[in-house]
Protein backbone atom coordinates (compact mmCIF):
# COMPACT_ATOMS: atom_id res chain seq x y z
CA UNK A 1 0.00 0.00 0.00
CA UNK A 2 3.05 2.24 0.40
CA UNK A 3 3.07 3.50 -3.20
CA UNK A 4 -0.50 4.64 -2.81
CA UNK A 5 0.39 6.69 0.24
CA UNK A 6 3.28 8.33 -1.62
CA UNK A 7 1.20 9.38 -4.58
CA UNK A 8 0.21 13.07 -4.25
CA UNK A 9 -3.47 13.60 -4.30
CA UNK A 10 -3.16 16.51 -6.73
CA UNK A 11 -2.48 15.29 -10.26
CA UNK A 12 0.27 17.08 -12.23
CA UNK A 13 2.57 17.86 -9.26
CA UNK A 14 4.41 14.62 -9.68
CA UNK A 15 6.94 14.32 -12.51
CA UNK A 16 6.69 10.91 -14.04
CA UNK A 17 6.48 8.90 -17.16
CA UNK A 18 3.09 9.82 -18.49
CA UNK A 19 2.99 7.22 -21.22
CA UNK A 20 -0.49 5.73 -21.56
CA UNK A 21 0.94 2.27 -20.89
CA UNK A 22 2.52 3.41 -17.57
CA UNK A 23 -0.64 5.17 -16.48
CA UNK A 24 -2.76 2.20 -17.38
CA UNK A 25 -0.40 -0.23 -15.55
CA UNK A 26 -0.27 1.91 -12.39
CA UNK A 27 -4.04 2.24 -12.30
CA UNK A 28 -4.43 -1.45 -12.94
CA UNK A 29 -1.99 -2.35 -10.14
CA UNK A 30 -3.70 -0.03 -7.72
CA UNK A 31 -7.11 -1.43 -8.67
CA UNK A 32 -5.88 -4.97 -8.07
CA UNK A 33 -4.48 -3.96 -4.70
CA UNK A 34 -7.73 -2.23 -3.77
CA UNK A 35 -9.69 -5.22 -4.91
CA UNK A 36 -7.47 -7.56 -2.88
CA UNK A 37 -7.82 -5.33 0.16
CA UNK A 38 -11.60 -5.08 0.02
CA UNK A 39 -11.92 -8.79 -0.76
CA UNK A 40 -9.98 -9.54 2.41
CA UNK A 41 -12.20 -7.18 4.39
CA UNK A 42 -15.29 -8.80 2.89
CA UNK A 43 -14.11 -12.36 3.59
CA UNK A 44 -13.21 -11.32 7.13
CA UNK A 45 -16.65 -9.82 7.60
CA UNK A 46 -18.37 -12.95 6.33
CA UNK A 47 -16.21 -15.01 8.68
CA UNK A 48 -17.11 -12.85 11.67
CA UNK A 49 -20.79 -12.85 10.70
CA UNK A 50 -21.12 -16.63 10.42
CA UNK A 51 -18.78 -17.79 13.13
CA UNK A 52 -19.00 -15.12 15.78
CA UNK A 53 -22.41 -13.45 15.63
CA UNK A 54 -25.27 -14.53 17.92
CA UNK A 55 -27.33 -15.48 14.84
CA UNK A 56 -25.05 -18.47 14.36
CA UNK A 57 -26.18 -19.80 17.71
CA UNK A 58 -28.99 -22.34 17.54
CA UNK A 59 -32.11 -20.41 16.61
CA UNK A 60 -35.33 -22.09 17.68
CA UNK A 61 -37.24 -20.50 14.81
CA UNK A 62 -35.12 -22.54 12.40
CA UNK A 63 -35.78 -25.87 14.05
CA UNK A 64 -38.51 -26.69 11.55
CA UNK A 65 -36.19 -26.01 8.61
CA UNK A 66 -34.35 -29.28 9.10
CA UNK A 67 -34.55 -31.67 6.19
CA UNK A 68 -36.92 -34.59 6.18
CA UNK A 69 -36.78 -37.66 4.05
CA UNK A 70 -39.81 -38.38 1.95
CA UNK A 71 -40.64 -39.91 -1.41
CA UNK A 72 -40.21 -43.29 -3.06
CA UNK A 73 -42.77 -45.94 -4.09
CA UNK A 74 -43.35 -47.34 -0.57
CA UNK A 75 -43.88 -43.84 0.83
CA UNK A 76 -46.30 -42.94 -1.99
CA UNK A 77 -48.23 -46.14 -1.36
CA UNK A 78 -48.64 -45.21 2.33
CA UNK A 79 -49.75 -41.69 1.36
CA UNK A 80 -52.33 -43.05 -1.08
CA UNK A 81 -53.65 -45.64 1.29
CA UNK A 82 -54.03 -43.15 4.17
CA UNK A 83 -55.89 -40.69 1.92
CA UNK A 84 -58.14 -43.40 0.48
CA UNK A 85 -61.84 -42.50 0.86
CA UNK A 86 -63.89 -45.38 2.25
CA UNK A 87 -67.43 -44.04 1.85
CA UNK A 88 -69.37 -42.92 -1.20
CA UNK A 89 -69.75 -39.29 -0.10
CA UNK A 90 -66.42 -39.08 1.70
CA UNK A 91 -63.72 -36.51 1.08
CA UNK A 92 -59.95 -36.70 1.01
CA UNK A 93 -58.33 -34.27 3.42
CA UNK A 94 -54.76 -33.15 3.93
CA UNK A 95 -54.49 -32.20 7.61
CA UNK A 96 -51.49 -29.99 8.39
CA UNK A 97 -50.36 -29.96 12.01
CA UNK A 98 -51.84 -33.44 12.36
CA UNK A 99 -49.68 -34.35 15.36
CA UNK A 100 -50.83 -31.19 17.13
CA UNK A 101 -53.66 -31.09 19.65
CA UNK A 102 -56.56 -30.08 17.39
CA UNK A 103 -54.97 -31.80 14.36
CA UNK A 104 -54.93 -35.19 16.04
CA UNK A 105 -58.56 -35.00 17.15
CA UNK A 106 -59.79 -33.75 13.76
CA UNK A 107 -57.78 -36.37 11.82
CA UNK A 108 -59.11 -39.19 14.00
CA UNK A 109 -62.71 -37.95 13.65
CA UNK A 110 -62.46 -37.70 9.85
CA UNK A 111 -60.96 -41.19 9.63
CA UNK A 112 -63.68 -42.62 11.88
CA UNK A 113 -66.41 -41.47 9.53
CA UNK A 114 -64.68 -42.92 6.44
CA UNK A 115 -62.91 -39.92 4.94
CA UNK A 116 -59.43 -40.18 3.48
CA UNK A 117 -56.93 -38.42 5.74
CA UNK A 118 -53.27 -37.68 5.30
CA UNK A 119 -51.43 -35.89 8.09
CA UNK A 120 -48.45 -33.55 7.80
CA UNK A 121 -46.42 -32.30 10.75
CA UNK A 122 -42.88 -31.00 11.33
CA UNK A 123 -42.72 -32.32 14.92
CA UNK A 124 -40.94 -29.19 16.12
CA UNK A 125 -39.90 -28.88 19.75
CA UNK A 126 -41.99 -25.86 20.79
CA UNK A 127 -43.31 -28.27 23.40
CA UNK A 128 -42.37 -31.83 24.30
CA UNK A 129 -42.15 -33.68 20.93
CA UNK A 130 -42.73 -37.02 22.68
CA UNK A 131 -46.35 -35.97 23.19
CA UNK A 132 -46.60 -35.33 19.43
CA UNK A 133 -45.07 -38.76 18.76
CA UNK A 134 -47.62 -40.36 21.07
CA UNK A 135 -50.44 -38.62 19.17
CA UNK A 136 -48.87 -39.81 15.91
CA UNK A 137 -48.84 -43.40 17.21
CA UNK A 138 -52.52 -43.02 18.07
CA UNK A 139 -53.29 -41.85 14.54
CA UNK A 140 -51.19 -44.59 12.94
CA UNK A 141 -53.27 -47.14 14.82
CA UNK A 142 -56.43 -45.72 13.27
CA UNK A 143 -54.90 -45.75 9.79
CA UNK A 144 -53.73 -42.14 9.44
CA UNK A 145 -50.20 -41.70 8.11
CA UNK A 146 -48.52 -38.51 9.32
CA UNK A 147 -45.87 -37.36 6.86
CA UNK A 148 -42.95 -35.65 8.56
CA UNK A 149 -42.34 -32.33 6.82
CA UNK A 150 -42.79 -28.59 6.90
CA UNK A 151 -45.51 -26.49 5.27
CA UNK A 152 -42.69 -24.28 3.95
CA UNK A 153 -41.43 -27.18 1.82
CA UNK A 154 -43.07 -26.45 -1.56
CA UNK A 155 -41.57 -29.53 -3.23
CA UNK A 156 -43.09 -31.81 -0.60
CA UNK A 157 -46.51 -30.16 -0.80
CA UNK A 158 -46.51 -30.39 -4.61
CA UNK A 159 -45.57 -34.04 -4.39
CA UNK A 160 -48.45 -34.73 -1.99
CA UNK A 161 -50.91 -33.12 -4.41
CA UNK A 162 -49.40 -35.12 -7.29
CA UNK A 163 -49.96 -38.36 -5.40
CA UNK A 164 -53.45 -37.48 -4.06
CA UNK A 165 -55.97 -35.02 -5.57
CA UNK A 166 -57.10 -33.78 -2.14
CA UNK A 167 -60.60 -32.31 -2.13
CA UNK A 168 -59.94 -30.43 1.13
CA UNK A 169 -57.11 -29.08 3.25
CA UNK A 170 -57.59 -28.70 6.98
CA UNK A 171 -54.76 -26.33 7.80
CA UNK A 172 -53.93 -26.48 11.51
CA UNK A 173 -50.13 -26.26 11.42
CA UNK A 174 -49.10 -23.04 13.16
CA UNK A 175 -46.86 -21.51 15.74
CA UNK A 176 -49.30 -21.24 18.63
CA UNK A 177 -49.09 -19.51 21.99
CA UNK A 178 -49.65 -15.86 22.77
CA UNK A 179 -46.80 -15.22 25.22
CA UNK A 180 -44.05 -17.14 23.36
CA UNK A 181 -44.27 -14.60 20.53
CA UNK A 182 -42.14 -12.22 22.62
CA UNK A 183 -39.42 -14.86 22.94
CA UNK A 184 -39.31 -16.10 19.38
CA UNK A 185 -41.12 -13.73 17.01
CA UNK A 186 -39.63 -15.13 13.81
CA UNK A 187 -41.14 -18.57 14.40
CA UNK A 188 -44.60 -16.95 14.06
CA UNK A 189 -43.70 -15.30 10.77
CA UNK A 190 -42.14 -18.55 9.55
CA UNK A 191 -45.17 -20.76 10.24
CA UNK A 192 -48.22 -18.51 10.31
CA UNK A 193 -47.32 -16.25 7.41
CA UNK A 194 -44.60 -17.75 5.18
CA UNK A 195 -45.87 -21.31 5.70
CA UNK A 196 -49.48 -20.34 5.05
CA UNK A 197 -48.57 -18.48 1.85
CA UNK A 198 -46.51 -21.45 0.66
CA UNK A 199 -49.45 -23.77 1.23
CA UNK A 200 -51.85 -21.45 -0.60
CA UNK A 201 -49.42 -21.16 -3.53
CA UNK A 202 -49.42 -24.93 -3.92
CA UNK A 203 -53.21 -25.17 -3.45
CA UNK A 204 -53.93 -22.48 -6.04
CA UNK A 205 -51.93 -24.41 -8.66
CA UNK A 206 -53.33 -27.83 -7.75
CA UNK A 207 -55.80 -29.46 -10.13
CA UNK A 208 -58.42 -29.63 -8.75
CA UNK A 209 -57.91 -26.83 -6.27
CA UNK A 210 -58.92 -28.01 -2.78
CA UNK A 211 -61.27 -26.14 -0.45
CA UNK A 212 -59.31 -24.91 2.57
CA UNK A 213 -60.44 -24.67 6.19
CA UNK A 214 -57.86 -23.18 8.53
CA UNK A 215 -57.29 -22.16 12.13
CA UNK A 216 -57.46 -18.48 12.93
CA UNK A 217 -57.78 -17.38 16.55
CA UNK A 218 -59.94 -15.54 19.06
CA UNK A 219 -56.85 -13.44 19.72
CA UNK A 220 -57.57 -11.41 16.56
CA UNK A 221 -60.15 -9.49 18.62
CA UNK A 222 -57.22 -8.12 20.63
CA UNK A 223 -58.28 -5.12 22.67
CA UNK A 224 -61.87 -5.22 21.44
CA UNK A 225 -64.19 -4.29 24.33
CA UNK A 226 -67.54 -5.04 22.70
CA UNK A 227 -68.88 -8.37 24.00
CA UNK A 228 -69.62 -11.00 22.94
CA UNK A 229 -67.09 -10.88 20.10
CA UNK A 230 -68.81 -11.01 16.75
CA UNK A 231 -67.18 -11.68 13.37
CA UNK A 232 -68.32 -8.18 12.39
CA UNK A 233 -66.31 -6.51 15.18
CA UNK A 234 -63.04 -4.75 14.51
CA UNK A 235 -59.93 -6.89 14.52
CA UNK A 236 -57.29 -4.28 13.85
CA UNK A 237 -55.93 -3.98 17.40
CA UNK A 238 -53.94 -7.17 17.98
CA UNK A 239 -52.29 -7.36 21.42
CA UNK A 240 -49.64 -9.92 20.45
CA UNK A 241 -47.55 -10.84 17.44
CA UNK A 242 -49.34 -14.20 17.45
CA UNK A 243 -52.65 -12.38 17.00
CA UNK A 244 -51.14 -10.13 14.33
CA UNK A 245 -49.94 -13.15 12.30
CA UNK A 246 -53.36 -14.80 12.55
CA UNK A 247 -55.02 -11.58 11.44
CA UNK A 248 -52.50 -11.36 8.59
CA UNK A 249 -53.58 -14.90 7.68
CA UNK A 250 -57.18 -13.72 7.34
CA UNK A 251 -56.11 -10.95 4.97
CA UNK A 252 -53.91 -13.34 2.99
CA UNK A 253 -56.89 -15.71 2.72
CA UNK A 254 -58.90 -12.85 1.24
CA UNK A 255 -56.22 -12.26 -1.39
CA UNK A 256 -56.00 -15.89 -2.52
CA UNK A 257 -59.76 -16.12 -2.64
CA UNK A 258 -59.97 -12.94 -4.69
CA UNK A 259 -57.19 -13.67 -7.17
CA UNK A 260 -57.28 -17.44 -7.55
CA UNK A 261 -60.81 -18.49 -6.60
CA UNK A 262 -59.72 -20.58 -3.61
CA UNK A 263 -62.53 -21.49 -1.23
CA UNK A 264 -61.34 -20.45 2.23
CA UNK A 265 -62.88 -20.75 5.69
CA UNK A 266 -61.09 -19.34 8.76
CA UNK A 267 -62.11 -20.61 12.20
CA UNK A 268 -61.44 -18.39 15.20
CA UNK A 269 -60.79 -20.89 17.99
CA UNK A 270 -61.41 -19.77 21.58
CA UNK A 271 -58.91 -21.27 24.09
CA UNK A 272 -59.35 -24.93 23.14
CA UNK A 273 -58.65 -27.49 25.89
CA UNK A 274 -59.02 -31.20 26.54
CA UNK A 275 -57.26 -34.59 26.53
CA UNK A 276 -54.02 -34.69 24.50
CA UNK A 277 -53.85 -30.90 24.87
CA UNK A 278 -50.95 -28.46 24.64
CA UNK A 279 -48.54 -28.31 27.60
CA UNK A 280 -47.91 -24.59 26.98
CA UNK A 281 -51.50 -23.71 27.88
CA UNK A 282 -52.45 -22.58 31.39
CA UNK A 283 -54.96 -25.35 32.23
CA UNK A 284 -52.29 -27.93 31.30
CA UNK A 285 -49.30 -26.50 33.17
CA UNK A 286 -51.46 -25.49 36.13
CA UNK A 287 -52.42 -29.18 36.43
CA UNK A 288 -48.76 -30.23 36.25
CA UNK A 289 -47.65 -27.65 38.81
CA UNK A 290 -50.55 -28.19 41.23
CA UNK A 291 -49.74 -31.93 41.28
CA UNK A 292 -46.07 -31.14 41.92
CA UNK A 293 -46.95 -28.75 44.74
CA UNK A 294 -45.39 -25.90 42.78
CA UNK A 295 -46.84 -22.38 42.95
CA UNK A 296 -48.83 -21.11 39.97
CA UNK A 297 -49.18 -17.50 38.82
CA UNK A 298 -52.78 -16.51 38.31
CA UNK A 299 -53.09 -13.30 36.37
CA UNK A 300 -55.29 -10.44 37.50
CA UNK A 301 -56.48 -7.61 35.26
CA UNK A 302 -56.11 -3.86 35.83
CA UNK A 303 -57.82 -2.59 39.03
CA UNK A 304 -58.07 -6.17 40.34
CA UNK A 305 -60.22 -7.02 37.33
CA UNK A 306 -61.15 -10.59 36.50
CA UNK A 307 -59.27 -12.35 33.73
CA UNK A 308 -61.60 -14.76 31.93
CA UNK A 309 -61.64 -17.04 28.91
CA UNK A 310 -64.33 -18.61 26.78
CA UNK A 311 -62.71 -22.06 27.24
CA UNK A 312 -63.93 -24.42 24.50
CA UNK A 313 -63.79 -28.19 24.73
CA UNK A 314 -61.97 -30.08 21.99
CA UNK A 315 -64.93 -32.29 20.95
CA UNK A 316 -67.02 -29.18 20.28
CA UNK A 317 -64.19 -27.70 18.22
CA UNK A 318 -63.89 -30.93 16.21
CA UNK A 319 -67.62 -30.75 15.38
CA UNK A 320 -67.12 -27.16 14.24
CA UNK A 321 -64.19 -28.17 12.03
CA UNK A 322 -66.16 -31.01 10.43
CA UNK A 323 -69.12 -28.69 9.93
CA UNK A 324 -66.84 -26.22 8.16
CA UNK A 325 -65.39 -28.92 5.90
CA UNK A 326 -68.85 -30.30 5.08
CA UNK A 327 -70.27 -26.92 4.12
CA UNK A 328 -67.18 -25.69 2.25
CA UNK A 329 -67.96 -25.06 -1.40
CA UNK A 330 -65.51 -26.06 -4.10
CA UNK A 331 -62.75 -23.70 -5.16
CA UNK A 332 -63.48 -22.23 -8.56
CA UNK A 333 -60.03 -21.85 -10.10
CA UNK A 334 -58.05 -24.17 -12.29
CA UNK A 335 -54.59 -24.01 -13.81
CA UNK A 336 -53.76 -21.29 -11.29
CA UNK A 337 -56.54 -19.05 -12.69
CA UNK A 338 -59.79 -17.93 -11.10
CA UNK A 339 -62.93 -19.04 -12.98
CA UNK A 340 -65.55 -17.46 -10.77
CA UNK A 341 -66.33 -16.10 -7.32
CA UNK A 342 -65.44 -18.49 -4.51
CA UNK A 343 -66.55 -18.89 -0.91
CA UNK A 344 -64.73 -16.86 1.76
CA UNK A 345 -65.85 -17.29 5.37
CA UNK A 346 -64.75 -16.68 8.94
CA UNK A 347 -66.44 -18.10 12.06
CA UNK A 348 -66.06 -17.90 15.82
CA UNK A 349 -65.83 -21.31 17.46
CA UNK A 350 -66.20 -20.62 21.17
CA UNK A 351 -68.27 -21.86 24.08
CA UNK A 352 -70.21 -18.62 24.70
CA UNK A 353 -69.69 -18.71 28.47
CA UNK A 354 -66.48 -17.11 29.74
CA UNK A 355 -65.07 -18.46 33.00
CA UNK A 356 -62.63 -16.56 35.26
CA UNK A 357 -59.18 -18.15 35.42
CA UNK A 358 -59.53 -18.30 39.22
CA UNK A 359 -62.58 -20.58 38.76
CA UNK A 360 -60.60 -22.78 36.38
CA UNK A 361 -58.04 -23.24 39.19
CA UNK A 362 -60.77 -24.07 41.71
CA UNK A 363 -62.20 -26.75 39.39
CA UNK A 364 -58.73 -28.24 38.92
CA UNK A 365 -58.16 -28.30 42.70
CA UNK A 366 -61.39 -30.25 43.17
CA UNK A 367 -60.63 -32.71 40.35
CA UNK A 368 -57.00 -33.29 41.39
CA UNK A 369 -57.82 -33.21 45.12
CA UNK A 370 -54.83 -30.94 45.70
CA UNK A 371 -54.89 -27.33 46.90
CA UNK A 372 -53.09 -25.01 44.50
CA UNK A 373 -50.43 -22.60 45.72
CA UNK A 374 -51.75 -19.48 44.02
CA UNK A 375 -49.71 -16.39 43.40
CA UNK A 376 -52.07 -13.68 42.24
CA UNK A 377 -50.03 -11.42 39.98
CA UNK A 378 -50.81 -8.44 37.82
CA UNK A 379 -51.18 -9.59 34.22
CA UNK A 380 -47.80 -8.89 32.63
CA UNK A 381 -47.62 -6.97 29.38
CA UNK A 382 -47.05 -10.13 27.40
CA UNK A 383 -49.70 -10.12 24.70
CA UNK A 384 -52.48 -11.56 26.88
CA UNK A 385 -55.92 -9.97 26.75
CA UNK A 386 -58.20 -9.69 29.81
CA UNK A 387 -61.17 -11.68 28.48
CA UNK A 388 -62.68 -13.44 25.49
CA UNK A 389 -66.31 -14.23 24.75
CA UNK A 390 -67.60 -15.63 21.48
CA UNK A 391 -70.79 -14.84 19.67
CA UNK A 392 -71.37 -18.08 17.75
CA UNK A 393 -74.64 -17.33 15.95
CA UNK A 394 -72.99 -17.44 12.49
CA UNK A 395 -71.37 -20.82 13.13
CA UNK A 396 -74.63 -22.08 14.60
CA UNK A 397 -76.58 -21.02 11.54
CA UNK A 398 -74.14 -22.06 8.83
CA UNK A 399 -72.16 -24.94 10.30
CA UNK A 400 -74.72 -26.39 12.72
CA UNK A 401 -72.18 -25.68 15.47
CA UNK A 402 -73.52 -26.14 18.99
CA UNK A 403 -71.07 -26.53 21.88
CA UNK A 404 -72.34 -28.83 24.61
CA UNK A 405 -69.46 -29.25 27.09
CA UNK A 406 -69.06 -26.95 30.08
CA UNK A 407 -65.67 -26.32 31.67
CA UNK A 408 -66.29 -28.59 34.67
CA UNK A 409 -67.19 -31.57 32.43
CA UNK A 410 -64.38 -30.91 29.95
CA UNK A 411 -61.72 -30.52 32.64
CA UNK A 412 -62.86 -33.76 34.25
CA UNK A 413 -62.12 -35.56 30.98
CA UNK A 414 -58.81 -33.74 30.68
CA UNK A 415 -57.75 -34.59 34.24
CA UNK A 416 -58.61 -38.25 33.74
CA UNK A 417 -56.49 -38.34 30.60
CA UNK A 418 -53.63 -36.41 32.22
CA UNK A 419 -53.45 -38.71 35.24
CA UNK A 420 -53.53 -41.78 32.98
CA UNK A 421 -50.98 -40.47 30.49
CA UNK A 422 -48.54 -39.16 33.08
CA UNK A 423 -48.97 -42.11 35.42
CA UNK A 424 -51.03 -40.39 38.08
CA UNK A 425 -48.94 -37.24 37.72
CA UNK A 426 -45.77 -39.08 38.88
CA UNK A 427 -44.26 -38.87 35.41
CA UNK A 428 -44.34 -35.08 35.16
CA UNK A 429 -45.20 -33.36 31.90
CA UNK A 430 -42.35 -31.20 30.63
O1 LIG B 1 -58.05 -18.44 21.86
C1 LIG B 1 -57.01 -18.35 21.25
O2 LIG B 1 -56.94 -17.99 20.12
C2 LIG B 1 -55.74 -18.65 21.95
O3 LIG B 1 -56.02 -19.52 23.06
C3 LIG B 1 -54.91 -19.80 23.86
O4 LIG B 1 -54.42 -18.61 24.43
P1 LIG B 1 -54.95 -18.16 25.85
O5 LIG B 1 -56.39 -17.92 25.83
O6 LIG B 1 -54.07 -17.04 26.30
O7 LIG B 1 -54.71 -19.49 26.72
P2 LIG B 1 -53.70 -19.82 27.88
O8 LIG B 1 -52.34 -19.47 27.51
O9 LIG B 1 -53.97 -21.20 28.28
O10 LIG B 1 -54.17 -18.84 29.03
C4 LIG B 1 -55.47 -18.98 29.60
C5 LIG B 1 -55.69 -17.94 30.66
O11 LIG B 1 -54.78 -18.16 31.75
C6 LIG B 1 -54.11 -16.94 32.07
N1 LIG B 1 -52.77 -17.30 32.56
C7 LIG B 1 -51.85 -17.79 31.71
C8 LIG B 1 -50.60 -18.13 32.18
C9 LIG B 1 -50.28 -17.95 33.53
O12 LIG B 1 -49.17 -18.25 34.00
N2 LIG B 1 -51.24 -17.46 34.34
C10 LIG B 1 -52.48 -17.12 33.91
O13 LIG B 1 -53.32 -16.67 34.69
C11 LIG B 1 -54.10 -16.15 30.79
O14 LIG B 1 -54.01 -14.77 31.05
C12 LIG B 1 -55.44 -16.53 30.19
O15 LIG B 1 -56.43 -15.71 30.70
C13 LIG B 1 -53.84 -20.48 23.04
O16 LIG B 1 -52.69 -20.69 23.83
C14 LIG B 1 -53.48 -19.68 21.82
O17 LIG B 1 -52.59 -20.45 21.04
C15 LIG B 1 -54.70 -19.27 21.04
O18 LIG B 1 -55.20 -20.36 20.34
Image: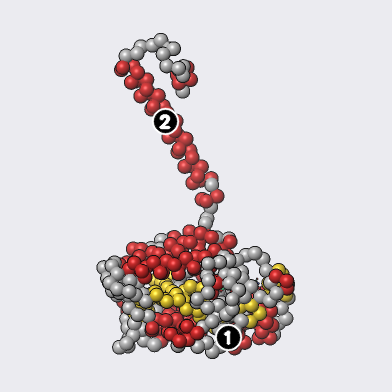
Could you tell me which quadrant the C terminus lies in? bottom right
**Which image quadrant shows ligand 1?**
bottom right
Residue highlighted by disc 2? 36
Task: Tell which of 143 and 248 is nearer to you.
Answer: 248
Q: Quadrant of residue 117?
A: bottom left
> In the orientation shown, which residue stands out farthest toward the left?
335
Secondary structure beneath label 2: helix
Q: Give neighbour class at mark 2: few <14, some 14-19, many 20+ (Cα, 10 Å).
A: few
Secondary structure beneath label 1: helix
Residue highlighted by disc 1? 410
Going 40% across and 64% down the picture, which residue do you hit? 197
Label 1, ligand 1: CB separation under 8 Å: no
Q: Residue 116, position in %: x, y?
A: 35, 81
Going 33% across and 63% down the picture, which residue do you hit? 155
Q: Residue 416, position in %: x, y?
A: 59, 85
Q: Quadrant of residue 72?
A: bottom left
Q: Residue 211, position in %: x, y?
A: 35, 76
Q: Give neighbour class at mark 1: few <14, some 14-19, many 20+ (Cα, 10 Å).
A: some
Amino acid sequence: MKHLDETPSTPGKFKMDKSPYFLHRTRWQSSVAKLAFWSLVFVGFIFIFFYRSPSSLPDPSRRSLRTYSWGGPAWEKRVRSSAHVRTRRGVSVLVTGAAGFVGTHVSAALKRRGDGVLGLDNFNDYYDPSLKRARQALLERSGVFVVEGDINDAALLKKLFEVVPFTHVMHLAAQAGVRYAMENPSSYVHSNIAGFVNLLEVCKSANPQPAIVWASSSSVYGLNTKVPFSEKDRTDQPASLYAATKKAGEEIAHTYNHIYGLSLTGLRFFTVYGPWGRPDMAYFFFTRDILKGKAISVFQGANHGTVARDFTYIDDIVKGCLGALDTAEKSTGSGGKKRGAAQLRVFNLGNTSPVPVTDLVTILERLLKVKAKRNIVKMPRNGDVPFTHANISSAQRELGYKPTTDLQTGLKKFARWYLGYYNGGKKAAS
